[in-house]
Image: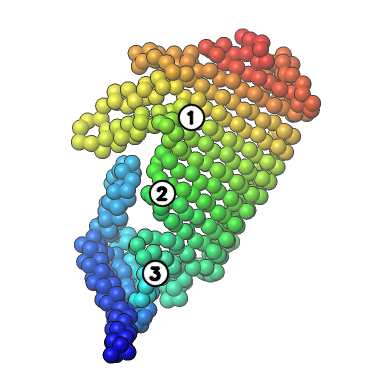
Amino acid sequence: MSKTKYLVISAVVVAAIAATPLVISQKVDSAIEANKVLLAQNGLKQDILSKSGYFTSQRTFSLEVADAKKARDFLLAKLIDKNAQYKLFVQSLKDETDGSINAGFDGLKFKGEMTHSNLLPSDVKISLSLDQLPKSLQDELANDKAASDAILPLLARGVLAVDMTFGSDEKLKDVRFKDIKEQIKTEGSTLNIDTEKQLLTLNENGGVVQGVLGVGKQNFGVDSEMFVFKSELKDFVYNFSYKDDLNNKGDIKIGKYTLEVNDEYSNTKFDLGSLKANSSVEDVKKDLQIKADYTLDNIVVNNSSADVTLEKLFAKLFLRGINSDTMKKVQADYNTLLLGATTPDDKVLIDDFVALVNHGVKLDLGIALKGLNSDMMNLKDVSVDTTLEIVQNQYTDKESPLALLGLLDITSKVKVHKDDRATLEAMGLTSAEDFALGKPEGDFFIYEIAMKKGAISVNGKTIQ
């Protein structure tokens, strides 16, 4: 009797497991049908073309833009729902595209494949590739055999494609663009495209989106008898964390970038050896703090009129002292004035500006360059570190804007290599007496410049 009971229980468990894929598959089908209705109401037509698999389902589908204006409004509404501060941008975009968006995008069609497990909660893989151009472009290609012969084979091969991964919570986790290596020839010119490892990964936790945007290689070029264009990017990585406009950070690294443009009138080439940049915006106890640091190596600019090389360029910024609540009010009032039904009143924004000034602000700026060489100037090592500060005050809009200068304190430290001082002095940028105020420090001269209440001094000496 006991053995029979266990056999029955085992059979029920096996049957339940066997039926699970069918149940999950049916639930997915229901969700797809509901989504199809939602998309149709918002200008997008989705059709499931085939379905296969039991434990793992594969569906092929098509997605077509039937009404571009509706689709645009649907997508932009989702953007505003999560980021109300973009309302002004969204309205401006709508106004600019209302007259042309349907003609430009109706008929655009993608083919895709969706894969997911029917056993356990898992990621959903979706692949999309461009299958059909908008109807307006189809009409143009029908009358242009050369362009048609160049573009239509790309669509047939699924060259423009992307793979996406969604978590079991339906949130996008990563996007990977298909590598492209194509040479497209048209009348008198050749377009070269060579890309590798282009991806975007996203992870949301507690309302904070963390992500990585990466490019292994992204090369574009156009060759013709009268014009040559090349853009080559290597090893680009952007790490970011985003909560809202007042709380986010990111860092960028570029391994190398080259831009070249040649035509019958000029030849220009720009080379960047590498770039590192960090930036952040943070609300620290109602104090809005903005930071940024940049390092660029081996910059070269060559053109028909001049050649410039720069070994290193450093730049930094640190802004603080802005009341975050006041800044939010500025943003909200600006959007309300431009998008509201009432006539804009500049007084509101003026009051906001005065409130920012009254609270005070402090800004640190720094820039340094090494190894600058050009036809006009050669500099070994120059740096400038400046602090601008407005302390809390009682300024009103009744006062002259020039009164703001009386509130502004500026201190700056200029460090100039002795050879660079001779170069700058020979250029006559200021008097020899001003250069003579520098304090020697090894191979450098130091100039500590201050402006307080409108008076300027260098190394403690007032300048008239």
Tell me the amino acid under the disc marked 1: Arg
Q: Nearer the viewer, mark 3 or mark 1?
A: 3
Which x, y percent locates residue 425? 73, 22
Decide: is 275 above or below 30: above
Furthest-front residue in this view: 1
Where residue 5 is drawn, which disc sits there?
none
Disc sitting over residue 208 in the figure: 2
Q: Is residue 265 above or below residue 328?
A: below
Task: Tell me the quarter of the picture where residue 183 sits.
Answer: bottom right
Colouring scheme, one of rainbow, by chain, secondary structure, one colour: rainbow
Q: Is residue 375 left or right of residue 162?
A: right
Which corner quadrant holds the N terminus?
bottom left
Quarter of the image holding residue 373? top right
Q: Which mark is residue 122?
A: 3
Would you name the residue on which mark 1 appears? 320
* Mark 2 or mark 1: whose residue is earlier in sequence: 2
Q: Residue at x 36, y 80 (%)?
A: 55
Q: CA distance from mark 3 to mark 1?
A: 44 Å
Near-viewer residue (331 or 55)? 55
Instruction: Assign a secondary structure to mark 1.
Output: strand
- The Cα atoms of the two marked residues, 3 and 2, are separated by 22 Å
**Quick check: 144 left or right of 428?**
left
Give the amino acid at mark 2.
Answer: Val
**Amino acid at circle 3:** Ser
Residue 40 x/y as whole percent: 22, 65
